[in-house]
Amino acid sequence: IEERVYQDIIKDNDEKAQVYFIYEVQGFGRMMVTCELTLIIAYIEAMLGGMADVVDANHEDLTAVEERLAVRIGTALEKLLADMWQPVVDMNYTLSKVETEPQFLAVATASEACFSVKFEIKLSDDFRGFMNLHYPRKFLEPILDLLRTSSSDEVDNVDAVWDAALQKSLEQVPLTVRL
């Protein structure tokens, strides 16, 4: 997890074309998932029976068909995002927008702190891409309050060596996700 300013997140995505999935969560606000455009197009190609390994690197926008299929991908992500947070708090994600242009996303104010998580997705030996989750601080505030109150009742008895070993092990675990 990396803390970054929202405007830096948008600027950093200028180097590679992105698809922006904007979600509304009642009681929390908006959050954003970004995926490299080439990754989304390769996934759509695979959905349509292609090999998902030939992608035009100069592709900068979605066709009408690709956009409708990207909405289906975004809708499928709703449940995955909700399931990810379910052990902590129940959330109901609703896809509100799929965009390739970041100017009018309005997920957070330009100077607002966001917490970002980056995932590398490997489709083949030769093709990889990145997906990022971006949570504005105000989105996470109710969850942080909940975690603070639930952890204050517990005794601080943490084995730092075991904790570091667990963290390192988890970072090295390969994960295959199939949608």
Image: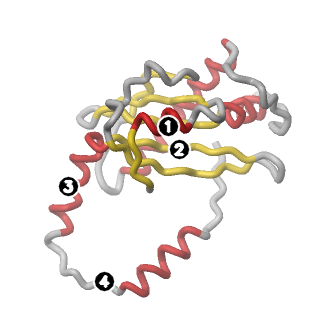
Residue count near mark 3 (Cα–Cα under 10 Å), binned few <14, some 14–19, many ≥20:
few
Q: Which mark is residue 33?
A: 1
Q: Residue at x 37, y 50 (%)?
A: 85
Whether residue 44 is situated above or below residue 161 in the rendered picture: above
Point out residue 102 in the picture as x, y percentages from the top left corner: 50, 24
Q: Residue at x 83, y 39 (%)?
A: 53
Which numbered disc, 1 or 2, marks the residue that appears first in the sequence?
A: 1
Amino acid, disc 4: Val
Residue receiving disc 3: 146
Residue receiving disc 2: 132
Q: Quadrant of residue 58?
A: top right
> What secondary structure is marked by label 4?
loop
Whether residue 36 is situated above or below residue 128 in the rendered picture: above
Q: Are marks 1 and 2 in contact (CB under 8 Å)?
A: yes
Which numbered disc, 4 or 3, marks the residue that appears first in the sequence?
A: 3
10 vs 88, left or right, is: right
Residue receiving disc 4: 158
